[in-house]
Structure formats: structure tokens, C-alpha cells
Image (spheres, helix red, strand yellow):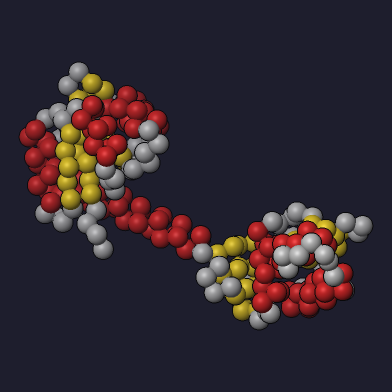
Amino acid sequence: MAKEKILIIDDEESIRKLVRRSLINENYLIEEASNGEEALERLRNNTFDLIILDVVLGDEDGFELIQEIKVLGIKTPIIFVSGRCEDHDQILGLGLGATNYITKPFSPAILCAHVKAQLRTSREYVAEKTRSSNYIMEGPFKFDLKTYKLYKNNEFIELSSKENLLIKFFMENPGQVFTKEQLYENIWNNSIIDDNAIMVYIHQLRKKLEDNVKSPKHIVTVWGIGYKFIA
């Protein structure tokens, strides 16, 4: 796994040095900025996994800087480190989008523990998002976009290639009513419809997906129009 990169934004060189040393020992890549302008320049030209930001940056305000960072569309997690330890400061910092607020003086070991926890959370979020992007989930149904396999209540349902395409299309558009013409055009890539073919595939899908084929709850006929999928 590539080393995770952290940006330290603090006007005090001694604090930056302390934090940098602690995090380098944990095998992180570190960059530094001593003021808001320098920080924004680094953020525009680099991607970071975490930002450690002091609330007081000389004459500047970390609360204002975090808002500028958000305006740029940067969603990197931010941990505030500050000597301002009043409740309202911590509430404001977290309300502006920081994921954590650590007050000075702090233990480098405790800061490292917070950093590890935040990066672990970020990794888990990315992994879950990646997993989710590989599936279409609707009610008891899960369609695997990599293998083109359908599961109902985590049990594999064997479908033909056209049945797979049909249920995938339905699951991508839940609750939407489609005419036979629309189904034929999207699944068969043909504007000349074959009523019988569509009815056969709908019937086959119902046999495999429905608890009661005579009273379908998932692939529903909308009389006079077509069909819709309900999870």
C-alpha cells in the first residue's frame, strides 16, 4: 500500500517539527505549510490523505482557512490542533467540517492515535464505497456488475444473458414504468419489438424471482403501458 500523505498547517515551526517527527516515525509522508496561502497552494497541487490544521495561524484564522479549503471542493479529513480549548471553539471547528479537535498541549502519541484512527476510517469508507459501486442493491436483490450475477437474499439465481440484462435494467431504474418498446430498444437494441419475446422473458424472470408468479410483487404489469420493477 502506498504511504499516506499528511499536510501539517501550523505557524509554529517547533510544533510542525514535533508533529512531523512523530508521524514520520509512523511511516507517513509529511508536507508542511506555515500559513494559509502556502497551505492552499500545496492543496491545489497535491492530494493529501489528512490535514492537521492549527486554529491560530499568526494573524490568520484556521476557521476561515477550513472554509476556503471546502470552497475548493477538497474533502480531505481535517484534524484541528489548537490552544483554544473553550467548548464553543471546539463546537465551531467540528461544525465547520473538521473530523476531530485536539487541544494543546497534546501528547504526540495521542495525536498519532487520532491520526491512525482517522486514516483507518477513511480507508474503510473508500473500500466500502468501492464495494458498493460494484453492485446494484434493491431490496432483497443484489446484482454484481463484475460477474453479472443476481442474488436474492444472498442466494444466487441463475439467469440467461438476456434475463440478466433485463433485471439489471429494471434494477437501475426502480419504480419507473417502461413500455414494451422501451424495453426492447434497451435490451435488444432494436426499435422493432417482438411482443412475444418480451412476454416470455418477463414470465421467465417472474418464475425465478417471485414468490408467487400469479401475483408478482417485483416485476409488475402496468396495464395499458408496460412493466415496472419494485424491490
Q: Is residue 67 above or below residue 175?
A: above
Give x and y (percent) for residue 155: 61, 78
Asked if residue 171 lies left or right of residue 45, the reply is right
Judging depth in this view, the residue of 63 and 130 nearest the camera is 130
Residue drawn at point x = 38 percent, y = 58 percent: 124
Residue drawn at point x = 36 percent, y = 38 percent: 74
Give x and y (percent) for residue 173: 69, 56
When asked about the image quadrant of residue 78, the answer is top left
Which quadrant of the rendered structure holds the C terminus?
bottom right
Give x and y (percent) for residue 8: 19, 39
Judging depth in this view, the residue of 156 and 97 nearest the camera is 156
Give x and y (percent) for residue 139: 66, 62
Q: Is residue 58 above or below residue 150?
A: above
Asked if residue 6 lies left or right of residue 147, the reply is left
When asked about the image quadrant of residue 34, the answer is top left
Q: Is residue 78 above or below residue 123?
A: above
When asked about the image quadrant of residue 105, the answer is top left
Q: Is residue 211 visible?
A: no
Q: Is residue 212 above or below residue 86?
A: below
Q: Is residue 210 visible?
A: yes
Residue drawn at point x = 55 percent, y = 67 percent: 145
| Number of numbered callouts drawn | 0
Kindly give the residue lying farthest to the right in the view shown.
224
Which quadrant of the rendered structure holds the N terminus?
bottom left
Residue drawn at point x = 83 percent, y = 66 percent: 193
Asked if residue 33 lies left or right of residue 195, the reply is left
